[in-house]
Amino acid sequence: MSGRGAVFLRRARAVLGSTMLAAAVFLLAGAADGARLRKDGMRQMAEAAKTIDSIFNERVPFDGGAIRRAADVLAAHSGAAMATAFERPDGSSTVDWEELARDRTRFDALASELNELARLFGEAVADAESLTPDLRMRPQDGAPGGSLLGARRSQVPAGNQPAEHLFHMMLETCTRCHAAFRRAG
Ligand code: HEC
């Protein structure tokens, strides 16, 4: 090979090498970012759930704006956004990626169940300005953790449900998904 050809090849390798390295670093950084964003979303949902819980337990005065914002946070981080956030294994040790690969359908169903419940909850509190009895769970709504716990079919209820009942169902959905797909790390 001529001297020129060899130089060209060396340069090409150098450029290619560094491009591939850059791509790998970029992918790794992307994965770490994805995991960080996902955990951040989960933490925001936990905060939102705490806000709603304090309102129903009357530890804080009713705040229509706060409860509706909390509903929005839960809707925004569940459903398709949540399914996408867990699309590819990214090295997070607190996700059971094996189980996720085995039963992606169930994972996505739980994510979308949470989203539907959050939307219904948002509708139930849309005009609420105080903690009126119609927002409250009724005895016939049943305690969370009833016989359907662990069942595969969606638990999204038909018809109007009191906001508090929808909230309890959301918490059940969090728990069922964590039991199946989250690991201690
Ligand atoms: C469809 C499944 C699913 C649903 C529904 C779900 N989670 Fe999670 N959650 C996970 C998984 C998996 C992890 C571990 C994520 C990781 O380590 O990247 C997690 C992690 C978390 C964490 C820890 C985040 C951190 O900082 O490491 C919190 C807090 C959390 N979830 C709260 C909630 C709350 C509150 C709800 C319900 C309102 C909820 N999650 C609903 C699957 C789910």
Image (cartoon, rainbow, N blue to C red):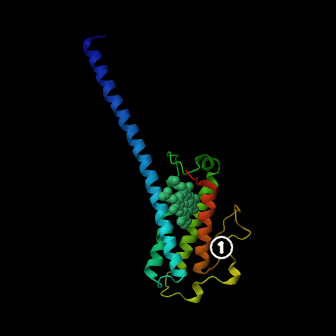
Q: Amino acid at mark 1?
A: Pro
Left or right of 175? Residue 63 is left
Q: Point out residue 136 in the picture as x, y percentages from the top left corner.
A: 60, 84
Left or right of 24? Residue 112 is right
State whether label 1 is within 8 Å of ligand 1.
no
The answer to whether residue 83 shows anywhere in this view is: no
Dot 1 falls on a residue whose secondary structure is: loop
Q: How many marks?
A: 1
Residue 152, quarter of picture: bottom right
Q: Identify which residue, 3 or 149, lies in the foreground.
A: 149
Q: Quadrant of ligand 1?
A: bottom right
At 50% from the left and 45% from the top, the residue drawn is 91
Residue 154, quarter of picture: bottom right
Residue placed farthest to the right in the image?
147
Q: Quadrant of the N terminus?
A: top left
Q: Point out residue 122 in the picture as x, y percentages from the top left corner.
A: 52, 76
**In the picture shown, does residue 140 fall above or below 111?**
below
Q: Identify which residue, 137 or 182, lies in the foreground.
A: 182
Residue placed farthest to the left in the image?
4
The answer to whether residue 117 shows anywhere in this view is: yes
**In the picture shown, does residue 65 fall above or below 12?**
below
Q: Identify which residue, 78 or 39, lies in the foreground.
A: 39
* Residue that carries the numbered disc 1 in the rendered image: 157
At 31% from the left and 29% from the top, the residue drawn is 15
At 63% from the left and 62% from the top, the residue drawn is 176
Residue placed farthest to the top in the image?
1
Q: Point out residue 175 in the picture as x, y percentages from the top left corner.
A: 61, 63
**In the picture shown, does residue 33 fall above or below 79?**
above
Left or right of 47? Residue 116 is right
Q: Point out residue 56 in the picture as x, y percentages from the top left corner.
A: 54, 81
At 57% from the left and 69% from the top, the residue drawn is 116
* Neighbours of disc 1 within 10 Å: few (<14), some (14-19), many (20+): few
